[in-house]
Each structure stands twice: as C-alpha cells, then as structure tokens.
Amino acid sequence: MTDSQVKANKTIKIPIPYNRIKSPLLRSSFEKYSFIPVFYKVKKGDTIYKLFRIYFPRDSNEIKNINSIKTNIIKIDSKLLIGYYPVQHIEKPSTNIVLQTNRNKDTLSLTSDKSKNVLVTVSGAAKTFDSPFEKTEYAYVLSNKIPEHSVVELTNPMSNKKLTGKVIGKIPPGKYPLDILLLLAKNDALDLGFLDLKFFVSVKYYK
C-alpha cells in the first residue's frame, strides 16, 4: 500500500499473533462491538492433521464444532472461522495525545450516591465527544438512558479498567445513533484504554 486509499472488496493482509485470537464460540452479545471474526482459507495440501494438530491445536474442537466439520475431508478455498480478534487494544496509544495528569478522578465515588436503594448495571455502545473543558475533577458523561446527575462507575470489559464519573446532561438529538448508551470525553475514554471513537462499556449506578 502506497497511500491511505482503501478500495471496496480489496483484501488486506494483516499479520496478527494467534495467541491474541479469542475462542470462536460467541460468549456474549457485546462480541460484535469488541471483536472482529478471523477466518482461515484452506490451501492446497492442508489436511485435518495440519489444521488441528499444528496450525490451531488450542481450539481444535471448538473450530470443528463452529464450522460443522464432521469428516476428514476439507475443501480447498473454504473459509474456517478460527476465532475473534479484539478491536480494542489494552495498550496506551503511542500518539501525541497528552492526558491531563492533574485531573483528580478520586473526588467522586460510586458509594457517594449510595443513598439511593438499587444498584443498576447496564452495558452498551458508547462514543467519544469533544469536551469544552480541558481539566475536570471527574469524568463527564452524557446519556439519555441513565438519569441525569447519577454517579456512574464505567468499566472497560476488555481490560477491566474502571473510571468514576457523573451524568451531566442528555445526548444532543440528531447527531448520534439512538442505540448509544452514553458519550464520554476523549481523554476519559483513553484513560479506560479505548482507542476507537465507538466502543463497548459497562456501567454501574444507584437509582
């Protein structure tokens, strides 16, 4: 590739380590937000022994089940689902983005809202927004599905990183998809380990 142009229907080879590929069995509804499927294209000379004793011994039974392989015959050029690769990277980004190190995120906690009776846990898609504030005491959250002024504990299910914030308002109408659970400032999303503009997040709050 010599430029940033990506054409439709063009195959792009992306080297990835096999140990980063997760089980081919779907485990929860958030897979489609956090993982992409990885397929292996059967080549001439491939055998069942090569596939499941040499190439993919770790998940051989799961790969056989998910692809309905019941015989020792495999067709050339057939595609086998071998697992899912995480879209989100746990590592911090090596870009020029500078996090606000002097923001104090410990001034707010989930227990400070414990005067309410019921602890609610929800999960869903989230996106980032450009906050007008460079320095904040805690994470600012916008949501139409979580009550305003709620103290929330945000969790990245991939890395289990947590962040406490507060719902300060509603999501502006017309600009974002209706299925979005919340908006989070870009710096706060980075603190949780999210690099993409859209990601999957788990939330706890009292009501």
Image: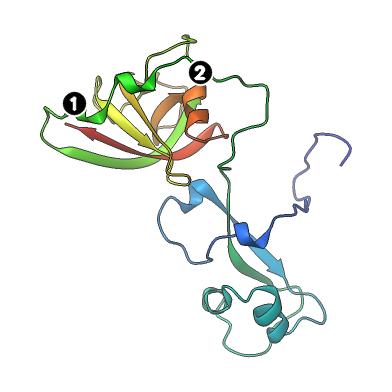
Q: In this rendering, which labeled residue sits more in front, label 1 or label 2?
A: 2
The residue under label 1 is 113
Q: Is residue 149 left or right of residue 66?
A: left
Tag 1: Cα neighbours inside 10 Å, few (<14), some, or many (≥20)? Answer: some
Identified at 24% across, 19% down, the residue is 149
* Whether residue 194 can be seen here: yes
Q: For the N terminus, which image quadrant?
A: top right
Identified at 38% across, 21% down, the residue is 105
**Foreground residue, 62 or 173?**
62
Element assignment for label 2: loop
User: Residue 68 location in percent, x, y?
Assistant: 55, 80
Please tell me whether residue 39 is drawn above or below residue 9 in the rendered image. Answer: below
Identified at 15% across, 30% down, the residue is 114
Element assignment for label 1: helix
User: Residue 194 location in percent, x, y?
Assistant: 52, 35
Residue type indicated by callout 1: Asp
Q: Is residue 116 left or right of residue 202?
A: left
**Foreground residue, 94 or 172?**
94
User: Residue 91 location in percent, x, y?
Assistant: 59, 39
Please tell me whether residue 74 is drawn above or below residue 87 in the rendered image. Answer: below
Identify the coloring: rainbow
Q: Is residue 55 left or right of residue 62?
A: right
The residue under label 2 is 101
User: Residue 106 location in percent, x, y?
Assistant: 34, 22
Residue 43's quadrant in the figure? bottom right
N-term mark: 1 or 2: 2
Number of numbered discs visible in the structure rendering: 2
